[in-house]
Each structure stands twice: as structure tokens, then as C-alpha cells.
Amino acid sequence: MSLTRSVAQRSYWPSNGLAALLDFAASSNRRAAAVLVLVSLLAFLPGFFQIPPVDRDEAIFAEATKQMIETGDYVDIRFQDEVRYKKPVGIYWLQAAAVNAADALGLPHARTTIWLYRMPSLIGAVGAVLATYWCALAFVSRRGATLAGLMMAGSALLGVEARLAKTDAMLLLTIVGAMGVLARVYLASRRSEAERPGWRLLAVFWTALAAGILIKGPLILMVVGLAAATLSILDRSARWLLALRPLAGMAWLALLASPWFIAIYLRAGSAFLADSVVQDMMAKIVSAQETHGAPPGLYFALFFVTFFPASILAALAAPAVWAARGEAPTRFLLAWLAPSWIVFELVITKLPHYVLPLYPAVAILIAGAVERNALSHRVWLTRGVVWWFVTPILVSLVATAGAMLIGRQLGLLAWPFFAAAIVCGLFAWRCYEKDGAEQAFLRATGGAILMAAGIYAVIAPSLGAAFPSARLAAVLSRSACEHPIAASAGYQEPSLVFLAGAATRLTDAAGAADFLREGDCRYAFVEERQEPAFALRAEAIGLRYDREPRIEAFNISHGQPLTIAVFQSAAAR
């Protein structure tokens, strides 16, 4: 979108500074990488160190890794005595490497420091932003590739995954790396004098596939395979795939990925395949697992929230993308996006992060439309940029309400961040027509980062009631006992096991009373509804115990308040 000098001078925001940022990044790959790393860290680090373990997936992954470290068994995956074969071992090894490194450097309490377990996710998220930039260079200029990377860095969904000790951020890195190679191979095949990719590029592709398989099983094969199959069907030829050297590549993939699969098969037989393929993957396809079922269309509805602020430009870019669907670059990106998206929409179990590996394709499509100045000018579409202003207002109100309802406070320290985010959104909206989509989006991204700072660095850590496990673990740390252990009845979140130790017993009211009777230095955490049964069992077995102050909390997994009574064996003091 062209601008006259007089219009630029009337801008309410110093647009030259924003243009200079992209000019600086576009001047070299090193500068682009530096800008993207800096923006990614600004987006992902707020709250990274402060937020306690979040139930349930993060706490389960972290506890299983901790037990690997404690037992020295890096083949089997267990949460307490229960096997955890839903996912392969890759993320556990990465988390264990981070914790062991910190332990060797003398960091106190490294094994119960949750942010160490989040380090692979942070590295994966930053790496995915850089990989998106590298992948986009096959389609757009360095400036457009930087814009695509910034879209991923500002993505609300990637911001969440970067702060959780789970698989998805690192999986995203492997998928984008593989798709970047596949894109170069495919686009080269469309040229009259196609060059065969070098071994270094091929090593990136097959290594990324192996790493993705070790992190989350066959999902990477689905995304990459569906894209390759779709392109081969549309072009009526799969000969371009021979440039990937499939025989040598599959041998390398097997060399990297198969040792652990062989080891776990020798250890557990077919139990791993039964749990990961049948009970986890196939069950999610045909039924709603863990109450996460939803009809088709959910991901499309959530897209505008989870890919904010770049999602606002997606509708404006859609007409240009559709018009260019026959061109090889657009065809590749749509083959990456559409088939896997349809599969995810058809799967019964739905979680927002499932479609995260498809967002880089959307980012590159939008960046291409921005670079060609091909965004739609239809009024009913351009009016949508008002959401850059409205969304920070809504998010600020919801976050403040959560602070009041759960934390019993106003969250005043977050208000300056929210106010600045609203101002950024206002200028992104009002100056869209004057300064163009590129600079408007940069302002919106600044607002998104400020929102993240307010939510993750201020609001979330202050919600002590939302993290009862941390408060219960503090009861044990204040004990005069050298090695206190606990049982919990009614409240059975994995984060409690992670913070209190693998010996923590998750049981019922009668089991908690029996546990206290077994010896000294024992604590029982009994949820309010289980207290009558606990009292009856205690009276029946003649249990003597002491009572500590109750803990008023809020279980975010169930979305309801709870009260936990704390009992200790009488001789524990």
C-alpha cells in the first residue's frame, strides 16, 4: 500500500521506526535471526520462570522425566508406578538433559524447578520461529520471511506452548524444518533446470522426521506425508520425491529413531504400541478423550484467537491466496495446510494445539499477500482490523476479573501493560489505511507482547489459589521432618506428585487415614467433601492426628473452588 509523504507525516505513530526494524532485519539473515530471537524472547519469557507447574499434561511430563532422573532408567516412562506410553521418549530426554545440566552446575532444587523442564519448549518455540523464517525464504523475500517469523512469535497459541513442559513446541520445530526442505525440493522440481538438493539439506529433512517421531510419534509423518501426497496427486507425479533419496533417508531415520523403540519393545513388549497407537491415537479419532470432544469447525473458530494478532490479516489475504492457488508456491502451502486441517477437524478429540504445526503455512501465505500488496480492500473485510483494538480490551477485562475472582486482588501491576496493549491495538486499527498492513501488524504484535507480559508475568503468578499444589508442597517444606511424605484424597493433580515427590499417595479418604497411621512425618491432604469419610475411618482405627489450617484454592482443571484440610500424624511435630 503506497503512502504519500503528507499522509505519513499525519500518522499518529512513528511509523519510520517500525519500518526501520524490518529494514534492519531484511538487510541480512543474521540480523533477521537476531530480531526474531529478541522478539521471541520478549514474547515467551514473561511468566516463564514464575508460573508454578500447570496441571495436567505439563506436570505429568515433568514428573515422568524427574522419575527417569531419580531412577537412572531412561528407557521406561512412568508416572509413579503407572506406565506412560502415550508418547515416545524424545521430550523426556530433552527435559532430563536440561535438568541434569542445571544440577551439574549446582542450581538448588533443580529437579523440582519447573522452568528447567520448560526449557526444551522455549528452545523449540524460538527455533520454530527461526525455522518459519528459513522456510519462508523459499517463497518470499527476506523481509516477507521476517514478517512470517514475527507472526509465529506473536501467536497466542505458540506463546502458551512455549511456557509449558510438553511436546508441541519442539514438535513444531521438527515439522517446520522438514517442510522447509520439502518446499525447496518441490519448488526446484517445478523449474526447468532443477538442482538436486545437497546431502546437508537431506540430512535436515530425515533428521527432523526422526526427531519428530521420537517426540510425538507418527504425527509428523501425517503432516508431511499428506502434503507430499496431495502435491503428487495434483501434479499427477511423485517423481519429485526421489530427490529426497528415500532409501538412504529412511535408513538414516531408522538409525536415529529405532534404538529406543527396540529397547522399549524388549522392556515392555507390545504395551507401548497398545498404549500409544490404540489407546491414545486411535481412541482420540473415534471418541472424545478426557472430555475434549467437539464437532468439526472448532479449529476454524479458535483460529482467530489462537493465531492472534496475525489471524486478523488471514481473512484479508484469503482472496489473494485463492486467486493464486494454481501457482506452485501457493499450491505447496495449501497442501501443507488444508489436508491436515481437515483431518484434525474430523478427529473427535480436539485440543487447540493440535493444529499448531499448520500455522507456519498460514503465516507464509499472509506474508506473501502482504509482500505483493494483494490484501483485500473490501470494506467488510478491512473492518475486521478493529479486533486489534477490541481484543486487548476484552482480554484485559477477563484477566482482571480472573484476578479478582480467584486471586482476590485487582492485579494493578498488570494494568500499565494492558493499557499500553490497548493503545498499540488502537493505533494498529486506526492507522491501518494510512500506514499499511505491515506496520499496523507490527503495532498489533507489540500489543500482543504487552498483553502476554501482563497476563503471564503479573496476573498468573499472583493467582496463588489457582496453584494449590505449590501451597501444599510448601506445607511439607515447612515441616520439621527431614523427609515428610503425603497422601491426598479428593485432590489428585499430577503437579502435587511433581512438587511433593513420587512417594506421594493419591488415594481416597479411608486410604489417607490409613496412610497417617503407618508412621511419623506423614501428612494427609483431604478435600472438603471427603472429610466426613476421613473422620469416620480415623475414629474406627483409633487414629491420632493434628490439624493444620485449611487451604482455600481453585482447581483450574475442573474450574471450581475447593477447600483442602491438612492433617499430620500426631508424632510429626
Image (cartoon, rainbow, N blue to C red):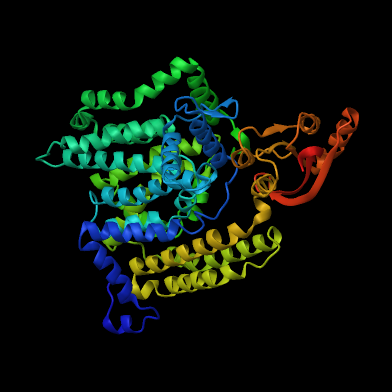
The x, y position of residue 285, in whole percent, is 52, 30
Residue at 48% in and 74% down? 423
Nearer to us in this view, 456 or 217: 456
Nearer to us in this view, 59 or 398: 59
Quarter of the figure with the N terminus: bottom left
Residue 382 shows in this picture: no
The part of the image, by quadrant, that contains residue 572 is top right
Q: Is residue 348 left or right of residue 376?
A: right
Quarter of the figure with the C terminus: top right
The x, y position of residue 257, in whole percent, is 35, 26
Residue 136 shows in this picture: yes
The x, y position of residue 180, in whole percent, is 27, 43
Q: Is residue 539 left or right of residue 515?
A: right
Q: Is residue 174 left or right of residue 533?
A: left
Q: Is residue 432 above or below residue 505?
A: below
Residue at 55% in and 61% down? 455
The x, y position of residue 457, in whole percent, is 53, 61
Nearer to us in this view, 527 or 192: 527
